[in-house]
Image: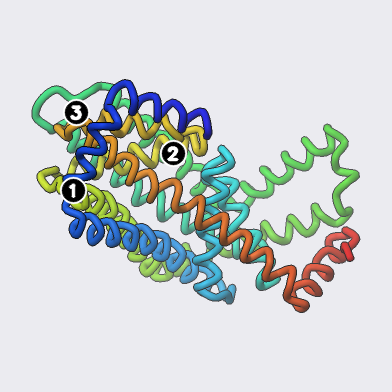
Amino acid sequence: MLIGLIVFLLYLHFFVGFGELLFVLENLNSADYVLYYSLAITAAVLSVFFVAAAWHDLLNSLSVKTKLRSVFLYTWVGYFVDLVVPCQAVCGEVTRIYLVHKENRESYGPIAASSLTNRMITYVISSLGLLTGIILLLTRAGDVPVYLVELLVVALVGTAIYLAGLFYLAIDEQAAGKLAGLLFKVLGFLRLNKYLPADLPERTQNSLLMLHEGFVTFRNKPRCLVKPFFFQFLSLVFNLATYFLVFYSLGLRNLYLDFFIIVYFIVGTIQIAAAVFSVGTLDIALANLFVFYGVPIQFGVLAATLLRFLTFWLPIVTGYVTVQVVGARKLLNPKDRENIAVQQTIEGQPSKP
């Protein structure tokens, strides 16, 4: 991360110039900047809120009761983990599932089913958005950099593969069991199974059964997916609004819809692939992409920096603070401490004093 920031600063020094950036900042309409960037921050927060609202509704459909506020906080924690640990869409998902389980002591099965279904809805909408971006890019007049098209196509293919894997888990009753069985075989080969509770395979099997039952519920009652789809669509709208508002805050208001769609998915693609290693690299890539669309380099750098604050630094800071708050609350609450001790005893692990 530090190396990426240094590279970005060197790029600003040699290719843009801090004097040029200062001149642009001094001539901005401060009232417009404060207004539109405040709205951009609000839109970014609302986009996360609607992702959480979609998951909360799916949890309710499976009779997993938890507070929307808690789900909202856990969603931020998941984003934080995804951005810090380079295993996007896996580590964050596992973290969110674990936190909900710790709160309400429900089986992992229905919690995971709702979380993965929410992820599937996200990827369905993202696939349609990526396809739209590719079509808009190909129909754009003038020369289009081949690498942009290739990047979006790779992202679309990767999204389709990941989505196919999730559908496989949802449709095939034995799919999750096969994956879990393979994992236990690997642990046995590495002789790590002796450190696991003896009844873990049995409890895992029960959770996987409930996981499949959760998927069956959504398949038999598709109306349960209507509200989550709507909430996820609103999240996408607010995400795109964030990009519009950032450029409006800089006084750039003559850009077209295809520009924002393409930028949105490029940011998502690189951020997913590189996570914390995208610092600096993605900022420079965005600045140059903006130049291709006719944005002056000084404005392009500022726009890239402001966007990255909302899409990367805001989730990291908010997620980190949430991790501390949630952790402190569970440690300070006697009831939570008692529940943790009971859970550790069930799992065959000695509770810590």
Instruction: Rate crowding at label 3 as few (under 14), some (14 to 19) or many (20 or more) other CA atoms within 10 Å.
Output: some
Alpha carbons under labels 3 and 2: distance apart: 21 Å
Q: Quadrant location of the C terminus?
A: bottom right
Residue 24 horizontal/vertical position (percent): 20, 40
Residue 271: image tag: 2
Kind of residue at disc 2: Gln
Kind of residue at disc 3: Phe
Q: Is residue 93 above or below residue 6?
A: below
For disc 3, the marked residue is 292
State how the image is colored.
Answer: rainbow
Residue sitting at x 19%, y 59%? 31
For disc 1, the marked residue is 28
Residue 289 horizontal/vertical position (percent): 25, 31
Alpha carbons under labels 1 and 2: distance apart: 29 Å
Residue 311 horizontal/vertical position (percent): 40, 48
Alpha carbons under labels 3 and 1: distance apart: 22 Å
Label whose residue precedes the other's in the sequence (3 or 2): 2
